Image: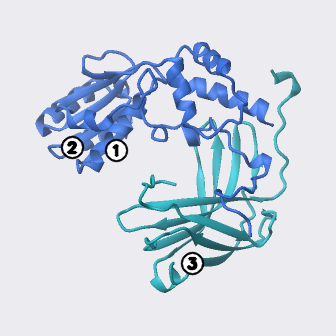
């Protein structure tokens, strides 16, 4: 009988996963952590969520989408209606407006990439959110005149804490690699993880 | 696993037997799988899904294709009355398993147990289709 994943029978070397693959690192796989590497109490965030449009503000790769998705998941678990809209171009303005206009009173709509919205659409969505008295959480890279719910910061300790939650790298990645990747990519954790992916590929074969 | 087991619940174990013990198959070959579920404790599943699928793994966006899927919810075919199951499918000609640097293509048998209360447990068992050699990293790019 061929053993399952809990069995001591080893999987052939070439089948071992790269722990830094998107499969393990994409938003939603690792819980949101603060700058010290501790898990953020998302339940507390949900319970104190005010109405209106609020921003989660940070540069690229600082955990905005991770935090947004965790808040939406926790809100959904508490029976609050949720929706997630990823804005990649002006074409996504309509689905975002539709989600906000149809949300329930206690609903939470996540708009990932708020600055991609045309200015007119952003204004209409803000008005719709006020009318529906729900909460819209928007991720932005820079201040856009929205009230700020959270600003995400990254540190080497945060990156190390994320790596601790990924599958094992079997010693292919040293603490110096983590620090180097973090500083090389100026605190962009997503790029740092991609950098570590490459290092693992070079050393793990 | 998509649900975190608590201390009061036992974690199931799924053992899978492939028709080729080395888990290497040729394109369009017949795959026969027999699986056994253990460690369910006093909580039998209300349904078991077994599937054969491929997925990509790498630095970019992920892709996935389900080749075979079956859901078993008849109590006579579920633990504790039946702790094992089996299925047969003809594998497709592609995609072939591939160990690239930026992207990899993996095939697996997935057994998913559903319990009362929306809890579930997923167990994946890899196998390969074809003999595409793994990508080599140029020596010049090694650290």
> Which residue is located at x 20 percent, y 46 percent?
A102
**Residue A107, label in figure:** 2
The image shows residue A107 at horizontal and vertical percentages of 21, 43
Q: Is residue B114 above or below residue A136?
A: below
Q: Which chain is blue?
A: A
Q: Which chain is cyan?
A: B
**Residue furthest toward the bottom?**
B76
> Which residue is located at x 82 percent, y 40 percent?
B135
Label 1 with label 2: CB-CB less than 8 Å: no
Q: Chain of mark 3?
A: B
Find residue B33 and report its image quarter: bottom right
Can residue A53 be seen in the rendering of this structure?
Answer: yes
**Residue B83, label in figure:** 3
In screen coordinates, is A167 left or right of A92? Answer: right
User: Closer to the camera: disc 2 or disc 3?
Assistant: 3
| Front in this rendered view, residue B80 or A110 | B80
* Same chain check for tags 1 and 2: yes
**Residue A73, label in figure:** 1
Can residue A117 be seen in the rendering of this structure?
Answer: no
> Which residue is located at x 64 percent, y 57 percent?
A6
Q: Residues within 10 Å of mark 2 (few under 14, many from 20)?
A: many
């Amino acid at each position: 009988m061929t053993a399952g994943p809990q069995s001591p029978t080893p999987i052939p070397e070439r089948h071992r996963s790269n722990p830094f693959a998107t499969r393990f690192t994409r938003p939603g796989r690792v819980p949101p952590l603060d700058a010290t590497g501790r898990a953020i109490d998302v339940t507390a965030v949900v319970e104190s969520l005010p109405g209106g449009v609020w921003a989660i503000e940070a540069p690229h790769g600082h955990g905005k989408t991770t935090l947004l998705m965790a808040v939406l998941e926790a809100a959904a678990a508490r029976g609050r209606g949720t929706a997630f809209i990823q804005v990649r171009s002006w074409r996504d303005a309509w689905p975002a407006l539709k989600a906000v206009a149809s949300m329930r009173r206690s609903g939470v709509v996540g708009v990932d990439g708020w600055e991609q919205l045309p200015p007119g659409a952003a204004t209409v969505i803000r008005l719709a959110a006020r009318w529906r008295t729900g909460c819209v959480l928007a991720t932005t890279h820079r201040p856009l005149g929205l009230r700020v719910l959270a600003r995400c910061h990254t540190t080497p300790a945060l990156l190390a804490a994320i790596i601790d939650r990924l599958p094992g790298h079997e010693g292919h990645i040293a603490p110096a690699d983590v620090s180097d990747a973090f500083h090389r990519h100026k605190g962009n954790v997503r790029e740092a993880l991609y950098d570590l992916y490459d290092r693992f590929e070079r050393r793990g074969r | 696993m998509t649900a975190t087991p608590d201390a009061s619940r036992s974690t199931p174990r799924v053992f899978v037997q492939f028709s080729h013990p080395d888990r290497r198959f040729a394109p369009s070959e017949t795959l026969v799988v027999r699986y056994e579920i253990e460690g369910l404790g006093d909580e039998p599943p209300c349904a078991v899904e077994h599937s054969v699928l491929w997925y990509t793994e790498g630095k970019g966006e992920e892709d996935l294709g389900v080749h075979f899927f079956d859901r078993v919810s008849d109590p006579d075919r579920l633990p504790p009355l039946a702790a094992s199951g089996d299925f047969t499918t003809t594998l497709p000609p592609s995609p072939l398993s591939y160990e690239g640097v930026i992207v990899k293509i993996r095939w697996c048998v997935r057994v998913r147990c559903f319990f009362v209360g929306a809890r579930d447990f997923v167990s994946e068992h890899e196998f390969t289709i074809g003999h595409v050699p793994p990508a080599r990293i140029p020596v010049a790019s090694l650290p």
